[in-house]
Image (cartoon, rainbow, N blue to C red):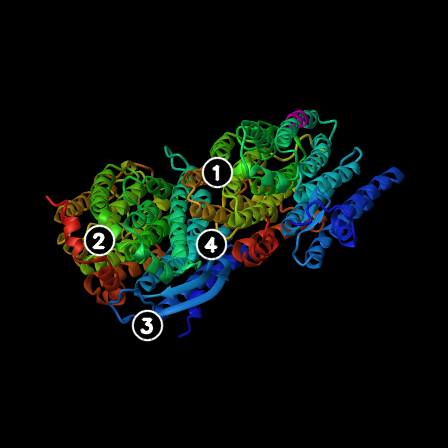
Amino acid sequence: MSATMSTAIGLKEILNLAPLILLTLTTVGVMLHIAWARRYHVIGALTIFGMNLALLSLPLLWLYNEGQPVPLTPLLVVDGYALFYSGLIIASALGVLTLCGAYFESYEGNREELYLLLLMSTLGAVVMAMSRHFAGFFIGLELMSIPLYAMVAYPVKDKRALEGGIKYLILSAAASAFMLFGMALLFAETGVLGFGEIGDKLAQGRSPLLLTGAAMMLVAVAFKLSAVPFHLWTSDVYEASPAPVAAFLATVSKVAVFAATYRLFLQVGVFQQPSALEALSVLAIASMVIGNVLALAQDNVKRILAYSSIAQFGYLLVALIAAGDRATETAGIFLLTYVVTTIGVFGVMALVSSPMKDRDVEHIEQFRGLFWKRPYLSSIMTAMLLSLAGIPLTAGFIGKFYVIALGVEERLWWLMGAVIVGSAIGLFYYLRVLIMMFQPIPTRDRVSEPLNWIQNAGGAMLVTAMVLMLVMGVYPQPFLDIIREAQPLLK
Amino acid sequence: MSASILVWLLVIPFVGGMASWQAERYSRYLPRWIALGTQLTVLGMSLWLWAVGDFTLNTPSAVPTFALEYKAEWIPSFGISFHLGLDGLSLLLIVLTNFLGVMAIGCSWKEIDRYVGFFHLNLLWNLAGVVGIFLALDLFLFFFFWEMMLVPMYFLIALWGHNIPGGKGRIYAATKFFIFTQFSGLIMLLAILGLVFFHHQATGQWSFGYFDLLATARKLDPTAAWWLMLGFFIAFAVKMPMVPLHNWLPDAHGQAPTAGSVDLAGILLKTAAYGMLRFSLPYFPDAMREIAPFAMALAALSVIYAGVVAFSQTDIKRLVAYSSISHMGFVTLGVFAGTEQALQGVVVQMIAHGLSAAALFILCGEIYERLHTRDLRQMGGLWARFPYLPPIMLFFSAASLGLPGLGNFVGEFLILTGSYAVSPLFTILCATGLILAAVYSLILIQKAFHGAPKADGHEGQYEDLNLRELGMMAILMVLLLGLGLYPQPVLDMSQSAMQTVQMIYSNPAVATTVSGVQP
């Protein structure tokens, strides 16, 4: 990156800021509108419009930049990698948004601020995907996390949600402190904050101070990605949050953290020395095995999904350990399939639940015989669960296939053993939820649901996710091409 | 003859399955007729292929050749293509699959009374997946079908299975089946990917193609080949199943509906033997020869152990399930012996066992429909109360114990004669299985049909087999008899494929490696 330190802002730079500017403008617009009048549907439409504009600006920027990275201030860079992950983040935020629309329809408190929080959090996530500097990383992380605390606790009259919000706030703040301290130690040693510059400086030698700093950052990242043993918050927070917020936690926040971390790992060599890789491998194996094992004992589907996401990120850590060209591609395809699937699962849960009941539909018994009552929604849930389990014909299989291919190529046999054992254990609880939906129920309960769920935005989004998921599973080539195209020359 | 017919063999059941699922809204019987029509169509197509195709390829050759091939790009960036191929071996198994598919639909005509459409969706998709396995010439595609057929099978057992008293329940059995096969399947995936990376290292190309990887596999260094072979071997050994990896099968059979059992015993188990003949032997002949003594020992163990355990079963379906394990032991023995006789015997044995086991499971289902029990201790004296069912059961039990004149005898005889030259010890051990087979088959007949009738309120006759059931049994009997008396058409069909496998597998070293463990 030759123009690393250039801070000049020209037309090109301003255009490249477009996604961020559009998201910010939407946020301000939504805020002003709420101050003016609380019109739920108008505000929802405004948010969706703004996000779609931001999403549309990404491919245009890719064409405009002709695939070249454009540095924006020392903090950010817009390259294919950033654009791809920004797209993934905004698209999943849009998915969550449509679910929120359906889910909070009948909520009696103030509904509109949720959109505001969601927009800000998404903005933070996009900043993370573009960051190439500790300051950018941290600003993005905090901008993303702080609205999330409020989102988890959004149904404020629900004690569980409040408790979950506070738990997440405290633990996450502790992780942020670790992150900052780690950054400070790295800064103390090198005197610079950009990923690239640190990488250059570190070519000369490594001190214990550096390792400590790196380890502290690793802890913070592991917390955010909920890798075992830093996973303890995950199941509680997922269980406490409304279903769409849990979907946001599982997709947007994790994708953003992973995208930023991966760039950091690739550019700062200290994370690629054997001790760091060993530590990461231990985290990955523990996440795959323990995450899956803990899910076995759960009866709450949200908690099952929380543990499943721990395990899924264990699989993804393989890409972080094997960092390189092929790993970048693997991470891209894995996250793409993961996001589509996760949004689908939580989407079904959100559509069968409603916030005005005491709790979401989340206990496994509540899924009994769902197929005979709501055949289409449960078909989608079935396909999504099979995708999480990595069965062929679904997107999840392609993701897992890539991870295993990467592991075999890099000869990471221990990790591959864990992937296989984890998948086999995982099957057990995915099948448990799945078969519950097909259990016979008395005929009098077997009323088909009205088909109107498909007409609202949430339903349409779910059908889109289902179609995407199947297409990725059956004919993934176009998606592979996009990912391959988008991520050359990260260094 | 256009190769796209191979694609239709897969597409038609998929579409038919969807159609019969949706047809359930209109009528309870429509799904059955749609499924039956679909399955008869594909059976007709495969028989037509048999009639018009020429499968005496220019063999034996060092590389397997195929009469029909269909290839389309699928995921080019990984060198994955939608590549199907048909030779004599795969055609025989496809005909068997589609034929038993018709039987499976026939035998569930009355047994399945809820969610009929969804049942046939699963059944047809499962059959299509198995046909896909027999056709795939791309290892990714092979794995794809290998895993894909599990899901419908899982549903068949978990939703329409029986919760027999004292058993652990159908969901337990279905999950166990799924996890066993998925776990071993993933190990096979590791091996496939390993092979693909060796290919990439050697040539710089990504490919999952059968022939590309064949070339690479032959040039591997022995250690690598050994490990990769092991990956395939584990997957196939679980599916075969070989003792000690067998214990999912009795549970699955015990709880499965009749159609599920027909499917499992008649078809699914054959995918493992097919995998060994199609992939393991041609890919890793040396490594396979290396573990041949071990595998043959396992085969002998399967034959004897499963035979002994079968004898002590009280549930007739579990008895037949253990007999399947025992019979599949012969298949393993024949595959690893690798002489042409033994391999041809393997093919006949697969078909004969597919027919006889399917028939026995259908009969078990019919007994259960009438008596509402499968417990041998609660039967007895049935001979007088059914005019047709007991003699038919006796016929198929006799087939299963290897009575000359029936298909199983031809298969077992060929396997044993073909294997004796390679490993007398294990062949003799396996041959004792024939005695065990006679014991457990006859004890089944003895306990169920002879002795004093139980006083169970059914003093008079039971409702006997109806025309549909008799018709199905008659066809199966004719086929088994035909296979036993005149197996030549089958042998001709598979000859070229088996000669090729035999040529690849046998080389001068074979005698020395295997004779090392002779007494």
Examine the rendering and report whether any part of residue B114 can be seen.
Answer: no
Marks 4/3: CA distance?
29 Å
> Is A174 within the magenta?
yes
Residue designated by label 4: B120
Mark 2 residue type: Gly
Labelled pair 2, 1 in contact (Cβ < 8 Å):
no
Q: Which residues are magenta?
A: A167-175
Q: Which residue is mark 1?
A: A426
- Which tag, 4 or 3, sits closer to the chain's start? 3
Chain letter of the residue carrying label 2: B
Whether residue A331 appears in this view of the structure is yes
> Does label 3 lie on the same chain as label 1?
no
Do pointers 2 and 3 mark residues of a single chain? yes
Amino acid carrying label 1: it is: Gly
Mark 4: few/some/many CA within 10 Å (<14, 14-19, 20+): many
Q: Give the residue at mark 2.
A: B334
Q: Same chain, marks 4 and 3?
A: yes
Q: Quadrant of residue B491?
A: bottom left
Residue that mark 3 sits on: B51
